[in-house]
Image (spheres, rainbow, N blue to C red):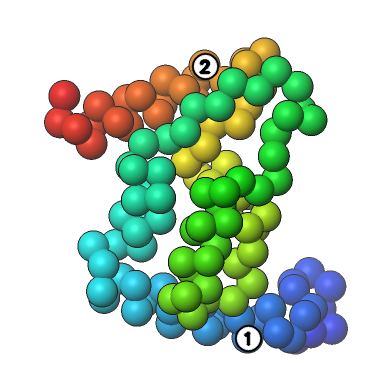
Amino acid sequence: MCSDRGIISNRLKIKAAIYNAQMFVNIQQSKLSFGEFLWSFVVHQPIQNTYQTIDQVPSTTALSDQMSLSLKKHGFKFVGSTIVYAHMQATGMVNDHLVSCFRYKEVKKLGQISQEFRSGN
């Protein structure tokens, strides 16, 4: 398995993925849902940043530090602040598109629609 270049070759990361799946189940059983747990860090509303240049976009924030620490306290492994912030960007918890990017307004609008849906308006 570890010799296949098409998959993760670090045995610790493979074991961590299996272990993290159990931690996910534990959170699902103790919280409303894993998504609710993660979105609670941004108060269930996407953060809309207004970066002008790519060098303004951080790789971590105080919030990703906080989420990383919480995940680690829940037993997760390989969930450092950089990985967590990348997850936040990828899932729309943070809009880090540059304001000049064609996707910026689209993602911002999606965040507003999502917020309206959650608030029942």
**Residue 48 versus residue 85 in the image, above or below:** above
Which quarter shows the N terminus? bottom right
Q: Residue furthest front?
A: 62
| Nearer-N-terminus badge (1/2) | 1
User: Percent x, y for residue 82?
Assistant: 67, 55
Q: Residues within 10 Å of mark 2 (few under 14, many from 20)?
A: some
Q: Mark 1 belongs to which amino acid?
A: Lys
Residue situated in front as seen by the camera: 49 or 86: 49
**Residue 103 versus residue 118 in the image, above or below:** above
Disc number for residue 15: 1
For residue 1, say whether it is visible: yes
Disc number for residue 105: 2
- Residue at x 34% of width, y 43% of height: 43
**Snapshot quadrant of residue 7:** bottom right
- Residue at x 63% of width, y 58% of height: 81
**Snapshot quadrant of residue 2:** bottom right
Which quarter shows the C terminus? top left
User: Percent x, y for residue 26?
Assistant: 34, 79
**Snapshot quadrant of residue 109:** top left
Disc number for residue 108: none
Q: Residues within 10 Å of mark 1 (few under 14, many from 20)?
A: few
**Residue 57 versus residue 103 in the image, above or below:** below
User: Percent x, y for residue 6?
Assistant: 78, 69
Real-space Cα separation, disc 1 to disc 2, in angstroms: 40 Å
User: Percent x, y for residue 116?
Assistant: 25, 27
Asked whether, in this view, residue 33 is left or right of residue 16, the answer is left
Q: Mark 2 belongs to which amino acid?
A: Lys
- Residue at x 62% of width, y 16% of height: 99
Which secondary structure, mark 2? Answer: helix
